[in-house]
Amino acid sequence: MRYFLQRIAFYLFTAFAAITLNFFIPRLVPGDPVQSLIAKYQGQISTQAIQSLYVLFGLDKKQSLWSQYIDYWKQILHGDLGLSFTFFPAPVSQVIGQALPWTVLLVGITTIVSFFLGTGLGVLAGWRRGSWTDGLLPVTTFFSSVPYFWLGIIAIYLLTGPGSFFPSSGGFDSGLVPAFDQYFIPSAIRHSLLPALTILISSVSGWILSMRNMMVTVASEDYITVAHAKGLSERRVALSYAARNALLPSVSGFALALGFIVGGTLLVEIVFSYPGLGFTLVQALGAKDYPLMQGIFLVLTISVLVANLLADVAYLLLDPRTRKEG
Amino acid sequence: MDPILEIRHLDVDYGLGDRAVRAVRDVSLTLHRGEVLGLAGESGSGKSTLAYGLTRLLAPPGVISGGQVIYHPASGEPYDVLSLSDNGLRQFRWAETAIVFQGAMNSLNPVHKISTQLTDVLKAHEPSMSEHTRQARAREMLKLVGISPDRMDAYPHQLSGGMRQRVMIGMALILQPQVVIMDEPTTALDVVMQRQILGQLIELRERLGFSVIFITHDLSLLVEFSNRIAIMYGGRIVEEAPAATLYRDALHPYSKGLLSSFPALRGPRRELAGIPGSPPDLAAMPAGCSFHPRCPRAFEPCSVTIPVLGRPDATGRTVACWLHPSADAADSPGVSVASGEH
C-alpha cells in the first residue's frame, strides 16, 4: 500500500511537471495566437477586440508570467481549456469532447482486440513451436515492420472507390447527424472497419511476436519441467504455468498501449480523414491553434500517466515478487 | 527383494541420426522396493539424462532410442513406462514416480502461492478430492517436511533455498509415490542444510516406505545415505555394488578415483587425489573403454574393446573393467564394436 501511495505521488508530480511544460512551451514559440487570428480575420477585428482576445487567451501583456501561470492552473482545475481558434468560438474542451469518442472507440477497441488476439496466438505459437504455427512468424514479422499508414493507403487504394462497401474517408456518411439511431451507428461502424483493420493487422503482430518469444523463454524454466513431471494436463501447464508467467511483460506493454489510445494512431486518422483526436491535432497544428494543441497534449499526458499507473497496479496484482510485503 | 523399477538396456540420444550424441548407453539398473539406490558420476556422465529419460521428461532434442523401463505397481501387472499413452503417462507421473529436481531455486513457479502448487497435483490426480481435503493434505505435507503450515500462502520468493527444497520434497511425497528420484537435490544448498534435508528424507523413507534413486556427483553423500551405488561414466554404468562394499573395495579405477577425491571423516589418513584429465566428449567417445585415456591402469584391451558389466565374484556386484573379468566367462564375451560409430 505504501508503495502504491508512492507511485501515486510520483504520478501527481509528473502530471504537475507536464502541465507546467504545457503552459510554457507555446509561450516560447515565436509568434502569438492573437496575431495569427488577426491574420485569419484580415483586419476585421477592432483594437479593443484584439485586447480582449489577449485577455481571453491568457496572454494579457499587462499580467506577469507568474499570474498568467496561476490563472492557467485555475482554468485547468475548472476544466476550462480556453477557446479554440480553428473552431472559434468553440471552447477547446468541447472540440476535444467531440473528437475523443471517435478515437477512443476506434483505437480502444482495436487495441484491446489486438492484444487478446495477438497474445492468444503468441501463446499457441510459443507452446507449439516447431509445428505449423512457426509459419506465422515470417508473416507477423513482415506486418509488424510495415508502417500502418502505408497499410492504410494500400487498403484505400485497393478496397475503396465508387460502389465499394468501404468508404475511403470520414467517420460517418456526410448526410447524417451524429445520434444513436439505426442510420448513424451502422454508418459509423462501416467507416471504422478499414482503419480498424489497418491498425489491427499492424499491431497484432507485435503482440504475437513478444508473447511467443516469452513463451519460448519460459518453457525452458525448471518449473515447467516440474509441472510436466507432476502429471498436470498439457493445458494446465501451458496456461497456468507457462502463459501466466510469459504474460507479465506483455501486460505492462498493454497498459502503456492503452495510454496511447487517446493520442490515436495519428497517421491512420489522417489517412482515413477520421474525425478523431489525432486528426484534430493535425488541424490544430496547421492553424497554429495553441489552446487546442495545449488541450490535446494535456489529455494525452494524463491518459499516458493513468495508463502507467494501471500498468503498475496490474504488475502488483500479477507478479507477487513486486509486492514489497506479503 | 522385489524389484520396483527395472531399467533395461536404456539408450538416450540427443539429436537424431549420425550426429546424435549418445548420452546414455545400454544402461540396465534395478531399483528394489524400499531401497536407496545411489547414482554417481562426473558432470556429463549421463546420470541426470537417465533420470529424465526414465520419466520421459527429456526436452527436445533428447530422445529415448531404445530399452525398456519396467515399473512394478503396488498392485497389478508390471508395465513399460516408455510405451505408456500420453494419458497413462500423466497418471503415472508423480503418483508413482515423483522427482525432486536439481534447481531448488527455480523448481517452484514464482507467481503462484506454494499452496496452489501443492494442491494442483492433487487436483490433477485425484479430481474427486474436495478443496478442503486438498488444503488439509498440503498442510500435512508441509508439516511433514518441517515447514510451518502457516506458510501455505507464501510465494516462493519469500522462502529460503532450503525451505523451497523442503517444499519440493513435500510436494514429491504428496501422492505417496513408490519411487522418488532425487536429481542432485541439495546441490544448491550449503553443507549443513544438505545433511539436514537428506537426513530428514531418509527418515521419511523409513516411515513411508518409498524407494529412492539418488543422483549426485558427491560420492561421500551416497556412501552415507544409500544402500547400493552405481557409478556412471560416459553414459554407461561402470560399477555397481552395495554402498559399504564400494567404499571399502572399489574395483573400477574410475570409482577408486572418485572415492579418493574426497576425505573420509574417520579412519586412517590417506592422500587425496583427483582424476587426471576431463570427462569424455560424448559426441566423440574414445574407442574401447571410454575411461582408458584417463585410466592409470589401462592396458592393451582397454583401447580396443568396450568391457561389459560382469560379475567379478560371487557377491553379486558388477563392474565393467578388463582388470576384473567376469567370473563366469560365458556370461559376457565383451562387445568388440570399438565405438568408432562416428
Image: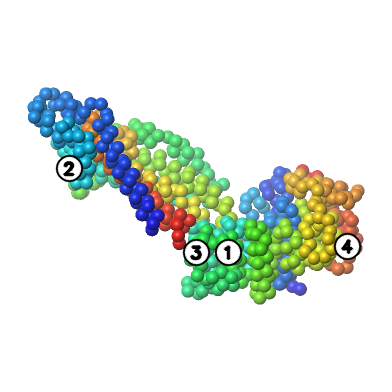
For label 2, count other residues whose C-alpha is less than 10 Å away and answer few (under 14), some (14-19) or many (20+): few
Q: Earlier in the sequence, mark 3 or mark 4?
A: 3
Query: How far, Cα to Cα, is label 3 from label 4?
Result: 54 Å
Residue type highlighted by circle 2: Val
Helix, strand or loop for disc 2: loop
For label 4, count other residues whose C-alpha is less than 10 Å away and answer few (under 14), some (14-19) or many (20+): many
According to the picture, the residue beneath numbered tag 3 turns out to be B154
- Residue beneath the point at 66% across and 76% down: B207
Circle on res. B163: 1
- Height in image: A163 above or below B62? above
Circle on res. A122: none
Query: How far, Cα to Cα, is label 4 from label 1?
Result: 44 Å
Q: Earlier in the sequence, mark 4 or mark 1?
A: 1
User: Which quadrant is the N terminus of chain A positioned in?
Assistant: bottom left
Circle on res. A177: 2
Chain letter for mark 4:
B
Asked if badge 3 and badge 4 are on a common chain, one would say: yes
Helix, strand or loop for disc 4: loop
Residue A87 appears in the figure: no
Quadrant in which residue B142 is drawn: bottom right
According to the picture, the residue beneath numbered tag 4 turns out to be B312
For label 3, count other residues whose C-alpha is less than 10 Å away and answer few (under 14), some (14-19) or many (20+): some
